[in-house]
Each structure stands twice: as structure tokens, then as C-alpha cells.
Image (cartoon, rainbow, N blue to C red):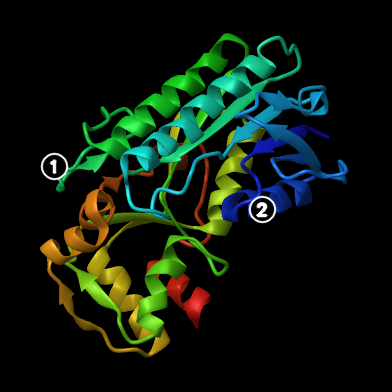
Amino acid sequence: MEKIVIAGGSGLIGTGLADHLRKAGNEVWVLTRKTTDLKRFFLNWDPEAKTIDPSAIEGTSTLINLCGAELAAKRWTKSRIQELYDSRVNTTEFLFESFKKSTELKQYVSASGAVAYGFEHPEKVYKESDSFGNDLISDITRKWEKAADLFSAICTVSKVRIAVVLSETGGALQKLANPIKKGFGAVLASGEQAIPWIYSEDLYSIFELVIANRLEGAYHASAGNTTNKELTKLIAKSLKKRLLPSVPKFIVRLLFGKMAVMLLYGNTVSNEKIHSEGFSFQHGNLNSTIQRIFG
């Protein structure tokens, strides 16, 4: 049985991933900032105060880091942008300082984003070996993964670049669906902006494969690519709702400020690399996946 510790494991992905890895026979612990009585599966830590329960380090062979303030939760003010960096980069650096003397850690798995290659070439299908872009999201990812590389001095480093996660229980899909459910849904701008996507269960299985095989380097966790227009229309069809006329680009910028870049631009990414490691997507059809979630 392998001991796995997940930092940032109390959110949508972390909760599902912990359950998935436990069912696969692993001992999984989640680091939590909320005070607990060290109940089973939970360990206290506070990266800002630089404190961590020693039990999180002892005997741990795999450390998964899912930490990071949600990109789309708030407007991108100067302080919020700093928080987006700090919650990823500083937290990763603290984890390394905590584990750097460990002789038992075999693998560090960093979660980052699949949309990180810039928006100058929307026609391109990006591979993991392509250079990051120069926009804010790309820069956050670049510095996030650079911090992850600190662990290469003591163990294997894996980087799972996650697409938009489709799930019944929350996340970006439910945020997109909410206005559609209320009758206010609409395609954003041209609707041609790319959206790489993955169903939550496939994402958990990719993490399982990465850990089981100690895969090194970056891997896209993306079942396929869609567009804002296609995804919005599929959700509306599944919910049997009509859409309003598309929202002009300037309105999106007015409503969301700097954060509008997340809604108006995207990347198309390849999943050939994870396929080459023997992974097969169980939910690779977008239409049936949306039906599964909303139908």
C-alpha cells in the first residue's frame, strides 16, 4: 500500500481524487488548513504560517499538489493576481522545504493548467513540449511548474496540465450551466474560442496512471477539444433551454475586466502523450458526457 498525501485536496478535484486513489488500494491523506483533531485521512497544515504536521512527511511516497486560488472566482485586481501566484508558487516552495530531507518521497505530482501557451496561434494544436505564452495565465503556470521542478533534486516530478473539468458536482461546467438553467445563457463573443475538456473520472484515472508508473514530465489531461459555442449549445440542448443572442466581446470585457481573457481565448491541446503511455479515455465523447452529467 502506498502512502499518498494531497495538498489542496478539499476541493472538487481533490475530494474525488482522494476517493478514487483509496478505492485503488492506496493510503491517502489530505492536508487541510481547517483545524481538525487529526481524524482519519486529514492532517493539519498552514503554508502561510509555514507549519505542517510531521505525519504528512513521514512514510509518504507520493505528494500531490492541487493548491491554487481559483482563477475565475474573483475579478483580477492587483491583490487577487498576487494571490493567484502566491497560492501556487509560494505553497509549492513551502512543500519542497518541508519534504527536501525526505528519503522516502518517490514522486511529486503537480497540477497545473492546459491553457498556458498563449493565444497568438488559435489554429495550433499544442503539445507538452511547446513553449508557454506571455499572458498572465501562462506566466502563472510557468512559475508554478518551475517551483515544482525544485522536487527534481529528491524525486520524480510529474506535471498534470488539466483541461476544463466536467463534473456533476461543481467546477467550471456548473458555472457555465447556471445562467443557461435560468434562461440567460448565451455564447460568448464569436464562440470559436477553444476549450480543452476532460470528465472528472478520467482525470482521476490519469493521476492514478501517472502515479502507478512514476511518469516523469508534463502530460495534458484532456479528452478532447471543443469551443465555447459547441459546449454552450450542448448544455442548452441537454437542459432543454433556449439561448440568448451571443454576448459581444466588449461586454464580456466590461463585465469581467482582466479575467475576460479566460472567457474569450483558449488553446487546443494534444493528448497523444498520455495515450502513448497506454491511457484510454472512458468518456471521450463530449455529447454523451454532457448528457451523462445533465441528462
**Vertical placement of residue 57 versus 118, above or below:** above
Q: Looking at numbered disc 1 in the image, what kind of residue is underneath it?
A: His
| Left or right, residue 283 beside residue 15 | left
| Residue found 22% across the figure and 84% down from its top | 244
| Left or right, residue 122 beside residue 77 | left
Q: Is residue 137 visible?
A: yes
Which numbered dot is residue 15?
A: 2
Classify mark 1: helix, strand or loop.
Answer: loop
Classify mark 2: helix, strand or loop.
Answer: helix
| Left or right, residue 183 beside residue 173 | left
**Vertical placement of residue 162 versus 211, above or below:** below
Which numbered dot is residue 144?
A: none
**Vertical placement of residue 106 versus 113, above or below:** above
Which numbered dot is residue 121?
A: 1
| Residue found 77% across the figure and 40% down from its top | 29
Q: Looking at numbered disc 2 in the image, what kind of residue is underneath it?
A: Thr
| Residue found 77% across the figure and 47% down from its top | 22
